[in-house]
Amino acid sequence: MAPVNTMRNGALAFGNQGSLTSASLKLTRNQVLETRAGEETTITPVRVATVDELFAETADLTLTEQDRIDFTTVFDREKMIESFHRGTAHGQIRYRINSYEGWLELSYDMISNPGTGDIEAFLHARDVTDEMRAELMVHTLTAVDYENIFTFNAPAGAPDHGSPSHPFEGDD
């Protein structure tokens, strides 16, 4: 979960440790307070004035039409405000963008600013490429009825040890 539980000068205070990009938003006023790029990223935060513009421009960067539809379903300012009033303060989506090789997870956490009553959100994008590849591999492996599955340790240049029921030659 993103570090969104502290206030600084009436706005969300947040860090961007481990994030590709992050942003602080005032949803009720449709304002982007701050955007940041992480230390090890090639992704440049979108520079816009409104939350609606931020979400529209980010949606336009998605790789596929389905990613765009999924993104706009989750990242809609009015729907986020409504969900906050119903008690949901967190949301996330995994998607791909044109300028980045891999998968991103964009999540948000919302609070009500006690000083102003504004609903504010913190966005945090992180690279989930390795996790998605592992999930897709597991899905593929479980969707097909294989008789045997072997894994290969690429750095060692050798197969991993066999399972107890089907050991490789030479295994005891």
Image (tube, grey):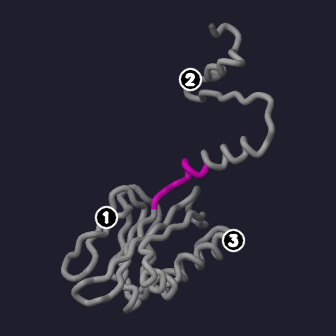
Q: Is residue 63 left or right of residue 37?
A: right
Q: Secondary structure at mark 3?
A: helix
Q: Is residue 64 left or right of residue 88?
A: right
User: Which of pointers 1 and 3 lies earlier in the amino acid sequence?
Assistant: 1
Q: CA distance from mark 2 to mark 3?
A: 39 Å
Vertical arrangement, residue 51 with respect to residue 145, above or below: below
Kindly give the residue lying farthest to the front in the view shown: 86
Q: CA distance from mark 1 to mark 2?
A: 39 Å
Callout 3, which amino acid? Answer: Gln
Where does residue 55 sit, x and y in percent of width and height? 51, 80
Badge 3 density bin: few <14, some 14–19, many ≥20, Cα 10 Å: few
Location of mark 2 (residue): 156
Where does residue 44 sit, x and y in percent of width and height? 44, 69
Where does residue 157 sit, x and y in percent of width and height? 61, 23
Q: Which residues are magenta?
A: 126-133
Q: Nearer the viewer, residue 120 or 61?
A: 120
Callout 1, which amino acid? Answer: Pro
x 55%, y 52%: residue: 129
Which circle marks residue 3 in the picture?
A: 1
Callout 2, which amino acid? Answer: Ala
Q: Secondary structure at mark 1?
A: loop
Q: Nearer the viewer, residue 86 or 169?
A: 86
Which circle marks residue 66 in the picture?
A: 3
Vertical arrangement, residue 95 with respect to residue 52, above or below: above
Magenta: main secondary structure: helix
